[in-house]
Amino acid sequence: MEKVLRKRAWRDLKENKFRYFALAFLIIISMYLVISLVGAADTIVDGTTKQAKKHKLEDGQFQVFVPLTTKQKENFTKKGLTVEETFYLDFRQKDGSKLRIFKNRKKVNKINLDEGRLAKNKSEVVVEKRYAQEHNLKTGSKITIDGNFYKITGIGSVPDYDACYEKLSDSTVDSKQFGLAFVTEDAYENLKDNENSIQSEEYIYAYRLNGAMTQKQLKNKLKKITFNPDDVDDPYFKDYWEETAGKKDDIKDGIKKLTDASTQMSDGLNKLSENNETLQKGANQIFQAYLKTAESQLTSFGVTSLTENNYANILKSLIAKSSDGLTRLSLESAKEQLDALKTYRDGIKAYTNGVKKASDGSSKLKEGTDQLEEGTKELMKAFDMETSNLTQFLKADDNIRIGAAAGDQVISKLAGMVAGVIIMILFTYVISVFVIHEIEKENSIIGKTDKEIQKNKELGQLYYEDDLKIIETGKGSDYISEFPFETGSLYYEIRKNPVFHQDKIIGIIGIVTDVTKQIRLEKELEELSFTDKLTGLYNRNYMEVRSKNYVRKDDFPTSLIMIDCNYLKEVNDHLGHEYGDLLLQRITNSIQETISKESIAIRVGGDEFLILCPHHDHQQAEKLIEQLQESFHSKTDNILKLDAAFGYYTAMDDTLPFKEAFHVADKNMYAHKKIIHQQRNHK
């Protein structure tokens, strides 16, 4: 049998020599391409690694609110770390592009010059090479920055901007719109003093560990470095701080007024002790006066009238609702004082001879208010707190700007190696199919039905019935069948055509192909293309598809609600993009928890969301907006404030296309956003 197989294999090779020659040629060409791809990738990866080592690539970088002091930097140096400022200023150029200005680097992320030299005086600059290429800049050319001319003395790059992403959240590099430049320290300080940069100076430090400590140890040390918020010049940070911890003066004034009132009350009670007959009248007047004082202090809580019959219930309700410890303490103190006064007044009525005891009680009340004032002073110290100076800590391995070219080549290398293996497997498979096909020609299955051939009886029955239909109609079939299993559905593409001889069907030729992987991949890709990675909501791609038929006739009225998340830029700028992402995720959770099952939430772009609400008229849309606002408020904490501008449009029929309906809702949302900004500026 083995001899027969060898003869048949040799005969097959001779008969199909051109086919196998072409196959061998394809194998050689394919492997040559794979080896070239892998070799080129290795060369680039090795070159990138050498350049990173030569130019002192950072181990990471960190950003702070306030620059480190000289002593703090010296402490890091003594511990064996290399730390260098990589502060920068952004300037808008005449062509609309943005140029990020750094000082010349000395110890970390040193400039790799392709040509020329470093800047040596105030009127010289080195430009990043890709920006230079896009703007046709060369060594010796002139460039204008902040209204001043600079001579380009060098073209190069830096390892921490291997890929020049403007922001770490960007997905593409656009050297036409963004680039880097390096100047002397004096030139940088002049640009800084002019105060014409797009935004405030960013305080970023690059570091090299040098084996002195781990990333985690460094991060923990940086977290322990604190700063006083009053030292921060950034106007956005000042606004944020005043909204959160800047209310201490209001609280102190309120407590002071309560203390003064209690002092006056104590003095009055002492005078009342001189005359028992007038004491009852005076005690009642004092109680009513304090009610009015407390009432005026509680107007900010929505209290319009405070009487002896309702004050206890009102204060209990306010205490229960209060989430602020200091406010709760003030309310509880006010209630205790009112209760004491009422008890004192009632005691006067019942015991006119107890004036002496009432006088003593008023003295104790005054002592209590004095203690309250002293306790408030201690609480106020909490507002004079210092907070961590660290705003961002980014390891080099997590920095998308670093090693981008090498990273792409590693992927290319792996892809090349995998492709080589796959190609060899495919060619081996094809050759084996050629040989086996020829050998097994005589193993005919003529005369057997599909039910007899197929192990899967359900599949065999399907083929058998389809064969009968083809014989009856004389027409072929081409379809994909789905077969569900516990581990997932399988998909088969089935193609069959009748074989004619002298206008009679003498047989059927068919091909069954397993297309499970292809169908599953198509479904996964479709789902991914319509899903926003961060929030899990539908994305703009889905909106574009849905806009062609965004509402059915049975769904009217339908409302389109636009949402624009406020404070996202401030959070990103001052707390980092991780908190910005967290803010968007909380907004998403509120939307998903609030909307109905038939409504569809879509993340349109950065901080904008769209909700399609079938069976929602304008009243229901406004009610839903109120519910969303309440949900946002409930998820607001001391760090992240959930707030948004809203706009909506209600479609009663399909006369207005989606694009125009969306534009109306978007326009209404921006009108609301404008009102919010005006209110904030007025405050």
Image (cartoon, rainbow, N blue to C red):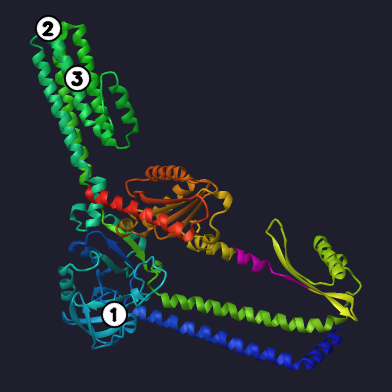
Q: Start and end of the magenta stretch?
A: 511-523
The amino acid type found where label 3 is placed reads Gln
Q: Is residue 516 within the magenta segment?
A: yes
Task: Calculate the distance from the C-alpha at mark 2 to the C-alpha at mark 1.
Answer: 92 Å
Q: Earlier in the sequence, mark 2 or mark 1?
A: 1
Q: Position of residue 141 (x, y in %)?
A: 24, 87
User: Magenta-highlighted stretch: main secondary structure?
Assistant: helix
- The circle on residue 529 is none
How packed mark 3 is, by other alpha carbons closer than 10 Å (few <14, some 14-19, many 20 or more), is some
At mark 3, the secondary structure is: helix
Q: Quadrant of residue 274?
A: top left
Q: Position of residue 417 (x, y in %)?
A: 57, 79
Residue at the spot of label 2: 277
How packed mark 2 is, by other alpha carbons closer than 10 Å (few <14, some 14-19, many 20 or more), is few
Residue at 45% of width from left, 75% of height from top? Answer: 407
Quarter of the picture holding the N terminus: bottom right
Classify residue 601 as left or right of residue 644.
right
Q: Nearer the viewer, mark 2 or mark 1?
A: 2
Tell which of 376 and 286 is nearer to you: 286
Classify residue 470 as left or right of residue 223.
right
Residue at the spot of label 3: 288
The amino acid type found where label 1 is placed reads Ile
